[in-house]
């Protein structure tokens, strides 16, 4: 070869290479296609056509050929070689035809979970065999699924039954959606996609219906073959239900909900903790077809968590043993707490002891330690106020008690004594509104007349609000007196002055006017005023004669104790009221003690009217009835069950009151018909009045009564608070292994609670040794609605509790329980044919019918058929022809 | 190795035939041309040349034959399409799981997270060798394989092109369980998850991966989180005054700095409120509209940055809700006169109430429910019925018998979860007297005194009933809010589904809707205006919305509007995960090999054949081969 020709060849080769590279990069981004004689062709990797850049080189080689061939043969050989190169390039460029195909690819998905019977699996295998036999060349695959999905090799022989083995890891779940996912990846391209689902439709995981709607978009048509061998004989425990609230020592019912597909018999055993339930443990029951409820009686003796477990022993056929049990757990709050407020705490020991033996925690406090806040009082479930004067409870404590009953639902009882009810000055107070009895008892026939002398300090230091309140107190006292009572009002400063001469209390108008004329001025001289009162009372005829002395000042006068003693000798009693910090407390106390009355000391002048009222009531009304009283039943009440009042001892006294109209109730009455025990509901709680006392004065015989603990225990238990916080309803639903917990927060005014910070606590499984606690935030999803979703991987009973806060304040709680005793696989008793039909029709499929699965019908799919095998075969043929052309000379040989 | 084109026997037959022809052709001698050359010295030169190249001439023939046979063999074997056997241990199998859930639409990376994930997947596919099979699947609320397990670059490319953003969240657990199922028993099994989230795996998927021996890798996608979202948007009717509704809007600022946003509220397409809000970093702000009575059906909220801020995820800047429907109900009240009952029935303007005396009662046809107050019908009614104090009369039909009268009963036991008691507080109701109701199996005791049932709900002959064992006038129940609630709850329980209708569904959440009798086909209109037909079965249709926005179901003579919203689980902070931890160990990223031309073996064979043919052509025409 000449040098020039060689160089030309090399240059041409370089140029072809560059041209080839350029062609490849340009063509690489294109999609080439053409239609020829109604056949569409596509070139999928056109970059390979860059190989055709070698053609100029072939041409150059042929032009300077040294072969001894005729020109015509040389040209023919060149054409053949060019064609050969083109054919191989087209093959490498992945040329294919695009046409509408009707080939069908079918994937069988067979449910092998525990809810499917062996007979159904046999039927399924037969269906697969028959389908394959109808078109042996069809592309058919097989998946089996339960919790997981597996691909199973089909037997080579079409007539053979496929092996549908259950999964080794168990079949306690059914996830048809996962099977469909796997099926998507098995369809070869260019085939119509068909899936056949052979199942009972009882899915426990995933969402087949949702997947079916998506399957339609992927061109998959689903056909369903329900596997329904008939409803198996099945007995299942659906749920074990406990009451929402269980109290220590209080019996309740545990309800077992049992389903039976056919009438049958079973033996139920209920365990409390590890042992059989004491009160009611074993039952042999006849079960009707459908749902049955069996109630067991139980009681909890100790606070804390209590677990119940029910086992069912079928006495007739039963398919799944896994669902023959259920458990439930409840948290029983500690012993109920009772607060007794007693002026002298030692006097409450008998009642406290009785309540202790009735399974209550009792705390006794003096009146000085009355709870002053709602937060403090809500620690108790029942509050007893025993013989504490109204002045001790005035103001905030009384308001707190009222709110405790009304808003929190607490139980409250006032117990009698000298300082209780009207005697304690509660008339007209908030407390009287709270109680079911009125303090103004009717006048008794034998009520004594009263002569009352009010000796009121009108010194200069009493000016202003003090004197006005003193006048108000005097007027109030006058109002309380009856027509045959007498009243005198003596004002004193340096000298005493009769403002109201001793006269009948019925002259109220004049008395009131005279009282209004009290003026404050001057010094303080008690003795003359007290003596004046003494003189007036001496000359007055009355069964009871009483003096109430009110002063705010110091006095160093002598003779007052002796004067009071003299008054006492004349059966005139004296009570003293010291107002402010400057009084001679010792003197006033001594005077009251000697005078057989009471001494009051207050720095708040507003208390004066109340004190006067109380004093007047105390002395004038004789509200205390002190004689032997046989308590008698009035209206029935649940807490009186088992208590025979006829065998109860006598009481030795009580405070006379009147019951208010209905809905107030008298449960126990005296022989005179006056209430001994009355009650009524106030808001969420109970308010009660026990007009006798609970200590050794009037109840001295009752304290020795054997039934005393039972009586008080049942009374308190019936009326004590049931819940500690507002309870918001908590709902929980379980679907496909995910629990959705919802709390509805609605206020009493039909308004939604928004903006709460709610935290959910899930503890469980309670009946396993591996319980865990998980917390989730309940997110607000709508007005008043808070929600959390919790995937559940384990079975058992879960305790749910939620705390709802508004800022830092806990305003409500929620409680609930989620029972997930076993996989829903075992709760399934009938095939969900509807789900299968819905899923299949959503994809344009339907029930699986013979021959329909592999029949394309009028469906077509765009399919590509690669041409490279044919092109390579053509290339081989062309090469052989080219070889032949070289070995045979065409034309003349000379 | 296996032949997936022509079978081995076919390949051998073809090779034998073509090789035989080639051999035969080379056995033939080319007929030479006769040329007269008069000059003797030329002959001598020629003969001299021939003697010196005799060996080369012999070898040239053999070499040419072998070259031809090689070309034939290459083409023949290419026809056999040889491949590694699927079960060969040298073949690796990989599942690429591409998260296409809603947060992958975030634009913190260009153009968005999903596209970045797809590009990463393309690099992995490009670097896959001939001995690697790959399956590509899209992960959102479920997992969708977009390709078979293949080494075909075209199919894998098409699969990557088909990955589309979803409006739902991602279920990684399900996706990894799918990968484990696909890879079970396969050699070199590995799975790569490309996602912006890395939630802790539940036990099931972790065990499945371990059992299948899958090597898990994680590719984190995403860079930052600057997003303000509407995290809650819902409307509810008040329980008692159902004519009024309350709307809740909650906004969340997931950025690390404060944002100023404009919130626009629209009702039935009209703007009803616009306000500008300042949101601190990480803050949630709620707005409650306590009366949206004017809106009949559709509510929409839209969020926009008030200033030139950046929001990485636009889809959560809009939310949709539909005011729950109210169905007009016709109720027949059979009573001799009970103002508490009649007054409570007047509270709901959607209830059309007709009152008749027991003597005038002639059946309840045409009504949705009937109330018998101290009355009994002569025959069981054909609609759901409420019986108040059925023990007051002796004659007539009642679903429950009554037994001994209870003095001063209380509601000691309340089934608070029952729809009848929704939003009621009845623990402290005072009742003077009541009849204990005798239940049969299947009846639900809604409220009871210790001595007997007082409120019972159940079914008789497929129709629901409720019985109250007391006269309202013997209680203080009519004086409480609980009474009209109990009454309205009862009517609703008779006539509608137990579940309170929500103003929006979560994307992917199915709902089933009862249709009027005779409807056989329903058309679903999606937010993107696409339509499709849904099948009707047993008078019901089931819809699973896959897109956020307003959906509509239409049938002859009716329609129903629905709204779909982002699943709350998707509305966690947008910040991308940096790593994934499984069983206490961080999941490493995959190694990304250099892109290699992925050709099947037959293509290489054909390419070599092509090269040999070109070379052979050149050598033939230079007479180096024959």
Image: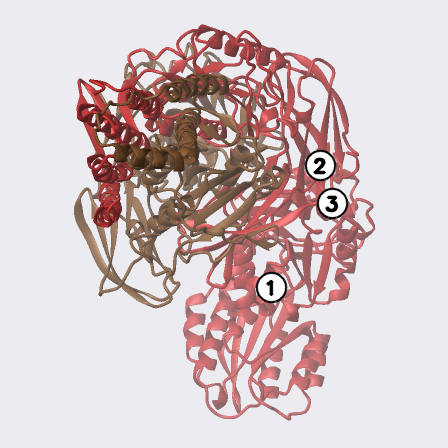
Q: Is residue B257 above or below residue B569?
A: below
Tint applied to chain A in the drawing:
red
3 and 1 marks on the same chain: yes
Provide the chain ID for the residue under circle 3: A
**Quadrant into which the C terminus of chain B falls:** top left
Query: Where is residue B581 shown, x and y percent of the image?
Result: 55, 53
The picture quadrant where one finds residue B451 is top right
Residue at mark 3 to residue at mark 1: CA–CA distance: 27 Å
Residue B586: quarter of image: bottom right
Q: Secondary structure at mark 2?
A: strand
In the picture, the disc for residue A308 is 2
Residue A585: percent from the left, percent from the top? 65, 84
Mark 2 surroundings: few (<14), some (14-19) or many (≥20) residues within 10 A: many
What chain does badge 1 belong to?
A
Going from the N terminus, do you reach mark 1 or mark 2 first? Answer: 2
Q: Which color was chain B given? A: brown
The residue beneath circle 3 is: A711
Left or right of residue A603: residue B28: left
- Earlier in the chain: of badge 3 and badge 1, it is 1
Q: CA distance from mark 3 to mark 2?
A: 30 Å
Number of the label disc, if any, that sits on residue A376: 1
Give SS at disc 3. Answer: helix
Q: Nearer the viewer, mark 3 or mark 1?
A: 1
Does residue A526 lie above or below A417 as drawn? Answer: below
Q: Percent position (x, y) of residue A96?
A: 29, 26
């Amino acid at each position: 070869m000449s040098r020039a020709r060689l160089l030309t060849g090399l240059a041409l080769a370089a140029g072809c290479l560059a041209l080839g590279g350029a062609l490849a990069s340009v063509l690489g981004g294109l999609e080439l296609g053409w239609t020829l004689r109604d056949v569409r062709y596509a070139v999928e990797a056109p970059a390979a056509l860059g190989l055709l850049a070698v053609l100029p080189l072939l041409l150059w080689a042929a032009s300077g050929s040294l072969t001894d061939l005729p020109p015509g043969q040389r040209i023919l050989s060149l054409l053949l070689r060019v064609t050969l190169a083109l054919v191989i390039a087209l093959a490498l460029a992945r040329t294919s035809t695009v046409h509408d195909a009707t080939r069908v690819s079918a994937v069988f998905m067979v449910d092998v979970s525990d809810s499917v019977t062996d007979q159904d699996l046999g039927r399924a295998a037969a269906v697969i065999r028959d389908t394959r036999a109808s078109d042996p060349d069809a592309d058919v695959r097989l998946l089996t699924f339960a919790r997981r999905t597996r691909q199973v090799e089909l037997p080579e022989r079409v007539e053979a039954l496929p092996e549908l083995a259950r999964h080794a890891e168990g079949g306690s779940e059914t996830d048809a959606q996962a099977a469909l996912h796997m099926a998507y990846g098995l369809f070869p391209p260019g085939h119509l996609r068909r899936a056949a689902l052979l199942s009972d439709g009882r899915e426990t995981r995933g969402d087949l219906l949702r997947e079916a709607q998506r399957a339609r978009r992927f061109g998959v048509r689903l056909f369903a073959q329900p596997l329904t061998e008939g409803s198996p004989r099945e007995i299942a425990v659906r749920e074990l239900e406990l009451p929402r609230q269980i109290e220590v020592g209080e019996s309740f019912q545990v309800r077992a909900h049992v389903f039976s597909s056919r009438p049958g018999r079973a033996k139920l055993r209920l365990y409390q903790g590890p042992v059989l339930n004491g009160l009611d443990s074993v039952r042999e029951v006849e079960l009707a077809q459908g749902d049955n409820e069996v109630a067991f009686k139980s009681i909890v003796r100790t606070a804390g968590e209590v677990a119940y477990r029910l086992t069912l022993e079928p006495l007739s056929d039963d398919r799944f043993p896994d669902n023959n049990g259920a458990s439930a757990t409840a948290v029983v709050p500690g012993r109920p707490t009772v607060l007794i407020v007693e002026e002298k705490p030692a006097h409450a020991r008998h009642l406290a002891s009785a309540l202790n033996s009735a399974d209550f925690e009792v705390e006794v406090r003096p009146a000085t330690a009355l709870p002053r806040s709602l937060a403090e009082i809500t620690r108790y479930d029942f509050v007893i106020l025993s013989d504490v004067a109204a002045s001790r409870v005035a103001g905030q404590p009384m308001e707190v008690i009222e709110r405790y009953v009304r808003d929190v639902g607490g139980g409250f009882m006032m117990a009698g004594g000298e300082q209780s009810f009207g005697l304690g000055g509660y008339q007209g107070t908030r407390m009287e509104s709270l109680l079911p009895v009125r303090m103004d008892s009717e006048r008794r026939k034998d009520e004594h007349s009263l002569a009352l002398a009010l000796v009121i300090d009108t010194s200069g230091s009493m000016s202003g609000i003090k004197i006005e309140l003193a006048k108000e107190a005097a007027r109030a006292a006058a109002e309380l007196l009856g027509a045959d009572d007498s009243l005198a009002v003596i004002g004193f400063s340096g000298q005493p002055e009769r403002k109201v001469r001793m006269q009948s209390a019925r002259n109220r108008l004049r008395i009131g006017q005279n009282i209004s004329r009290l003026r404050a001025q001057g010094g303080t001289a008690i003795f003359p005023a007290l003596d004046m009162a003494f003189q007036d009372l001496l000359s007055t005829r009355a069964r009871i004669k009483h003096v109430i002395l009110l002063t705010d000042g110091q006095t160093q006068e002598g003779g007052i104790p002796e004067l009071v003693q003299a008054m006492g000798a004349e059966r005139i009693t004296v009570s003293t009221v010291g107002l402010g910090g400057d009084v001679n407390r010792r003197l006033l106390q001594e005077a009251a003690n000697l005078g057989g009355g009471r001494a009051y000391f207050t720095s708040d002048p507003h208390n004066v009217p109340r004190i006067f009222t109380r004093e007047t009531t105390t002395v004038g009304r004789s509200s205390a009835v002190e004689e032997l009283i046989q308590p008698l039943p009035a209206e029935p009440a649940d807490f009186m069950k088992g208590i025979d009042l006829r065998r109860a001892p006598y009481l030795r006294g009580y405070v006379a009151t009147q019951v208010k109209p209905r809905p107030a109730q008298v449960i126990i009455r005296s022989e005179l018909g006056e209430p001994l025990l009355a009650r009524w509901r106030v808001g969420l709680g109970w308010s009660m009045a026990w007009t006798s006392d609970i200590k050794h004065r009037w109840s001295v015989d009752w304290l020795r009564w054997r039934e005393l603990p039972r009586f008080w225990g049942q009374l308190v238990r019936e009326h004590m608070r049931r819940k500690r916080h507002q309870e918001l309803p908590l709902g929980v639903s379980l679907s496909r292994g995910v629990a959705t917990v919802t709390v509805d927060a609605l206020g009493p005014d039909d308004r939604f609670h928004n903006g709460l910070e709610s935290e959910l606590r899930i503890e469980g499984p309670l009946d396993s040794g591996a319980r865990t606690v998980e917390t989730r935030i309940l997110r607000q999803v709508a007005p008043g609605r808070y929600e959390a979703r919790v995937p559940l991987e384990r079975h058992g009973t879960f305790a749910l509790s939620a705390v709802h806060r508004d800022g830092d304040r806990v305003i409500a709680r929620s409680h609930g329980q989620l029972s997930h005793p076993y996989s829903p696989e075992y709760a399934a008793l009938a095939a969900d044919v509807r789900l299968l039909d819905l899923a299949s029709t959503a994809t344009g499929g339907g029930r699986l019918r013979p021959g329909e699965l592999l029949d394309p019908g009028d469906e077509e799919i765009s399919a590509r058929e690669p041409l490279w095998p044919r092109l390579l075969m053509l290339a081989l043929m062309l090469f052989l022809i080219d070889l032949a052309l070289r070995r045979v000379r065409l034309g003349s040989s000379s | 190795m296996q032949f997936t084109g022509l079978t081995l026997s076919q390949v051998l037959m073809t090779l034998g035939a073509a090789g035989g022809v080639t051999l035969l052709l080379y056995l033939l001698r080319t007929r030479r041309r006769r040329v007269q050359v008069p000059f003797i010295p030329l002959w001598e030169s020629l003969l001299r040349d021939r003697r010196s190249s005799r060996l080369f001439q012999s070898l040239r023939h053999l070499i040419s034959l072998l070259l031809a046979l090689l070309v034939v063999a290459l083409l023949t074997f290419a026809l056999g399409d040889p491949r590694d056997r699927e079960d060969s241990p040298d073949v690796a199998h990989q599942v690429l799981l591409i998260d296409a859930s809603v947060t992958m639409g975030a634009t913190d990376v260009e153009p968005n997270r999903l596209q970045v994930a797809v590009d990463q997947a393309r690099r992995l596919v490009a670097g896959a060798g001939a001995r690697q099979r790959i399956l590509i699947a899209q992960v959102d609320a479920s997992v969708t394989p977009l390709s078979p397990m293949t080494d075909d670059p075209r199919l894998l490319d098409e699969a990557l092109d088909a990955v589309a953003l979803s409006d739902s969240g991602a279920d990684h657990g399900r996706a990894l369980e799918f990968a484990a199922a696909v890879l079970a028993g396969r050699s070199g099994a590995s799975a790569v998850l490309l996602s912006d989230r890395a939630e802790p795996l539940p036990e099931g998927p972790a065990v499945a991966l371990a059992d299948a021996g899958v090597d898990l890798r994680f590719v984190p996608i995403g860079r930052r989180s600057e997003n303000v979202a509407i995290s809650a948007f819902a409307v509810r009717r008040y329980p008692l005054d159902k004519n009024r509704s309350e709307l809740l809007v909650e906004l969340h600022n997931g950025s690390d700095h404060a944002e100023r946003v404009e919130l626009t509220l629209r009702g039935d397409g009209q703007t009803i409120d616009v306000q500008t809000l300042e949101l601190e970093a990480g803050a949630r702000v709620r707005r409650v509209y306590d009366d949206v009575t004017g809106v009949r059906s559709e509510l929409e909220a839209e969020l926009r940055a008030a200033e030139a801020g950046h929001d990485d995820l636009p889809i959560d800047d809009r939310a949709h809700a539909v005011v729950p429907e109210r169905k007009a109900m016709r109720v027949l009240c059979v009573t001799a006169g009970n103002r508490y009952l009649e007054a409570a029935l007047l509270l709901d303007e959607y209830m059309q109430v007709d009152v008749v005396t027991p003597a005038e009662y002639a059946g309840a046809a045409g009504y949705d429910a009937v109330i018998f107050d101290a009355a009994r019908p002569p025959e069981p009614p054909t609609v759901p019925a409420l019986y108040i104090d059925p023990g007051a009369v002796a004659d007539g039909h009642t679903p429950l018998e009554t037994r001994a009268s209870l003095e001063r009963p209380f509601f000691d036991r309340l089934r608070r979860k029952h729809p009848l008691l929704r939003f009621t507080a009845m623990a402290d109701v005072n009742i003077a007297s009541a009849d204990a109701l005798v239940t049969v199996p299947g009846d639900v005791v809604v409220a009871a005194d210790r001595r007997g049932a007082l409120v019972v709900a159940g079914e008789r002959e497929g129709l629901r009933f409720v019985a109250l064992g007391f006269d309202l006038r013997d209680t203080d129940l009519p004086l409480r809010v609980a009474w009209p609630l109990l009454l309205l709850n009862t009517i609703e329980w008779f006539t509608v589904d137990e579940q309170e209708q929500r103003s929006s569904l979560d994307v992917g959440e199915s709902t089933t809707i009862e249709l009027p009798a005779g409807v056989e086909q329903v058309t679903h209109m999606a937010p993107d205006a696409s339509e499709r037909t849904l099948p009707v079965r047993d008078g019901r249709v089931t819809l699973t919305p896959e897109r956020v926005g307003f959906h509509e179901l239409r049938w002859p003579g009716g329609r129903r509007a629905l709204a779909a919203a982002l699943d709350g689980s998707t509305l966690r902070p947008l910040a991308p995960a940096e790593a994934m931890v499984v069983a206490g160990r961080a999941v490493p990223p995959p190694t990304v090999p250099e892109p290699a031309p992925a050709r099947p073996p037959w293509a290489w064979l054909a390419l070599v054949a092509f090269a040999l043919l070109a070379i052979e052509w050149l050598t033939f025409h230079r007479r180096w081969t024959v």
